[in-house]
Image: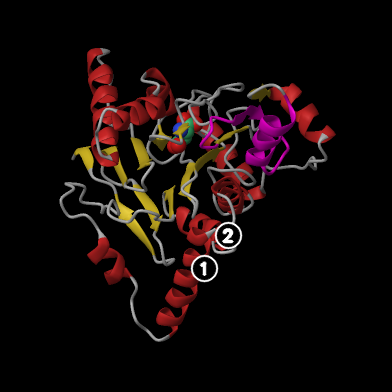
Amino acid sequence: MSNRRSFLRKSALAGALTLLGVGVWRRNESRANHKSNDPTGSIFNDSTPTVALSTWRFGLKANAEAWSVLSKGGKSLDAVEAGVRVVEADPQERSVGYGGRPDRDGHVTLDACIMDELGNAGSVAFLQHIMHPVSVARAIMERTPHIMLCGSGALEFALKEGFKKQNLLTPESEAEWRRWLKDARYTPVVNIENHDTIGMLVRDTEGRISGACTTSGMAWKMHGRVGDSPLIGAGLYVDGQVGASTATGHGEEVIRIAGSHLVVELMRQGRTAEEACREAVNRAHAMFVRRGRDLRDTQIGFLAMRADGQAGAFALRNGFSYARTLDGGDTQLLNSPFLLP
Ligand code: ASP
């Protein structure tokens, strides 16, 4: 409770300082543990940091929404769900939820999962017609004895739970798909432009960490394809004692190394968040090379947070960004370090 009060006090103070034009960023920077070699910043010295991290530029709006939950004393589980729902509902974001690019047959199929610090988890894969797969995943977690539902069974469950059936294919995404069909010869492609996932990790005022991950997956994928994002251990993993990780990019490569679980295990062994993400990327890269694959059009990125709030990211290639909001509410969009030029 005292943490919550101090968070509310800090948030109110930060708001006042912002109004006065005083940056709160410096305050957080000076609190950072510069002994860490994590160039994306560490907040290791703060015993009760509240932190929101999420992938890509759309993470900025997700963090803002998550922060409004946290600033009312809300739980990290509610914050991650609320945060990623903003991106799921935005038709301008063409790789998540409503307005997501369809598969090669023109169907928008969604993957999502959610997990809390106790190991409670819910997941939904190959779900159609429902705007908020993350909330379906949470309902599976809270109202069934299972972790994961897929396809028509997941849809049936969602409708029974009162989720509304709707058309998720916007005219913009349909037009793009029709253009793709003309010269794609119906062959699924992987490239850096045709995907992106919102993965979000939050630590609340009580030190609880939760994560959520949601995507429409790779554009023009085969009907029925499921990526890493709904797979607990691949697209997301949370261990309240150790930390949490989420992934984005070429899902098949993340699945191959059980990526997010690997990152959490590496943090358990003492790595910082960034070191753990870097080692997971190295592992995926080595496997890719051993299989003789062409890496040119591939990207994977990991985002991680240790249980104490220390945060970091690492990607295969340049271009992966993530939004980080720290105690006080100040947010930055940061470029992840990367392996290949
Ligand atoms: N990981 C997602 C997938 O493979 C896509 C992405 O995050 O870019 O479906």
Q: On the image, numbered disc 2 is attached to which residue? A: 73
With 148 as the anchor, is 229 left or right in this view? left
Q: Position of residue 122 (x, y in %)?
A: 62, 30
Residue 247 visible (yes or no): no
> To which quarter of the image does residue 324 belong?
bottom left
Where is residue 115? Give x, y as percent: 55, 35
Question: Residue 142, located in which quarter of the rendered image?
Answer: top right
Q: Which residues are magenta?
A: 116-144
Q: Which element type, helix, strand or loop, lies under badge 2?
A: loop
Residue ID at (80%, 43%): 164
| Disc number for residue 8 | 1
Q: Is residue 59 left or right of residue 144?
A: left
Indicate the amino acid at tag 2. Answer: Gly
Q: Mark 1 Cα within 10 Å, few/some/many (few <14, many 20+)?
A: some
The quadrant in which residue 260 appears is top left
Tag 1–tag 2 contact (CB < 8 Å): yes
Closest to the observer, 136 or 253: 136
Residue 120 lies in the magenta stretch? yes
